[in-house]
Image (cartoon, rainbow, N blue to C red):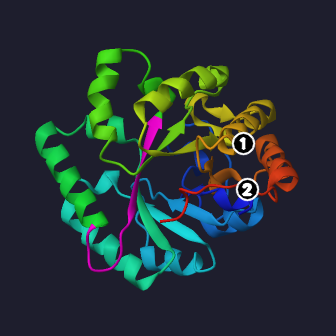
Amino acid sequence: MKLRDTFWLWGHPEGRYNNNIDNFGFHGFSRMTPMEGCLYLGIKNTFMVPCDWPCDRDQYNKSFKTLNKVGWEFTRKMHTPELIDEYINDAKKFSNINCVVFDDFKGLSAKHKDKELFIENLKKVIDKLHNNDVKRLDVWMVLYTHEFGIDEKVDAEFAEILKLFDGIIMWNWYESRYKEIPEKFEIFKKLTPNNRRMFGCYLYNFGEKKQATGEAVKWQLDFYREKMLAGEAEGIVPHTNTMADMDFESYDVFRAWIAEHGDEEISVPTLEN
């Protein structure tokens, strides 16, 4: 397959961060939808993450009809785990839905008062995603580099939870620390010996509330490509459509990079279900 086929857009409802609504420093007005973001960036898969915004899943799924693969976020619905049935039904209606993703898992799960009940419900949700009358849906989880590699005991305990997931996506939240990624990735590999892996790549510096730099974006893409060619990961997840139409340097760098490398052939045997 081609390298571009391994990319997944981290999609948000259009305008989700307009006018600095969540205090991430973005004061502009974007209108680009997730599907438009995929087309503009040359990406054929998406994780759709509403981030607590109401949205009609059917409408978005219809717009995603020509994409290869689609996954929806579920962490924020874990207070009502029975809702996972609706996501499984979506996969019946839209054949390209093949997974569910748990965003900000470590931070959001810590807010649940009954940790044992949360994990029990998580196991039930994952079991239902894997075993249902429609099809097996993969389960991905987001893990930030600042959430591991600090305390070995904490890492060892959390590694038991990581085993529940099919795949883990490693993200670097603070752009200024991107040179730490190689060291963090070595720890990440030890924590995920039997998980599939992907890399997240921010095209806006949410952690430090400003535009991402082209230098940091290109450095990450080069590093992630190297690890994918070595068979240590299977995809890259650029974030996000909601600033893609703002003429930011980082998006131009991304588009130039994927134009240069996107048609390279790559073997990713674990990518398919």
Q: Amino acid at mark 1?
A: Arg
Residue visible at 63% across and 79% down in the picture = 66
* Circles 2, 1 touching at the beta carbon (< 8 Å): yes
User: Is residue 114 something that shows in the picture?
Assistant: no
From which residue to which does the magenta span run? 131-143
User: Is residue 139 something that shows in the picture?
Assistant: yes
Q: Nearer the viewer, residue 202 or 15?
A: 202
- Judge from the rendering whether residue 116 lies leftward or rightward of residue 253; answer left or right: left
Q: Is residue 138 magenta?
A: yes
The residue tagged with tag 2: helix, strand or loop?
helix
- Judge from the rendering whether residue 91 lies leftward or rightward of residue 183; answer left or right: left
- Alpha-carbon neighbours of circle 1 within 10 Å: few (<14), some, or many (≥20)? many
- Alpha-carbon neighbours of circle 2 within 10 Å: few (<14), some, or many (≥20)? many
Earlier residue among tags 2 and 1? 2
The residue beneath circle 1 is 225
Q: Amino acid at mark 2?
A: Leu
The residue beneath circle 2 is 3
Q: Looking at the rendering, which quadrant does residue 39 occupy?
A: bottom right
- Judge from the rendering whether residue 218 lies leftward or rightward of residue 59; answer left or right: right
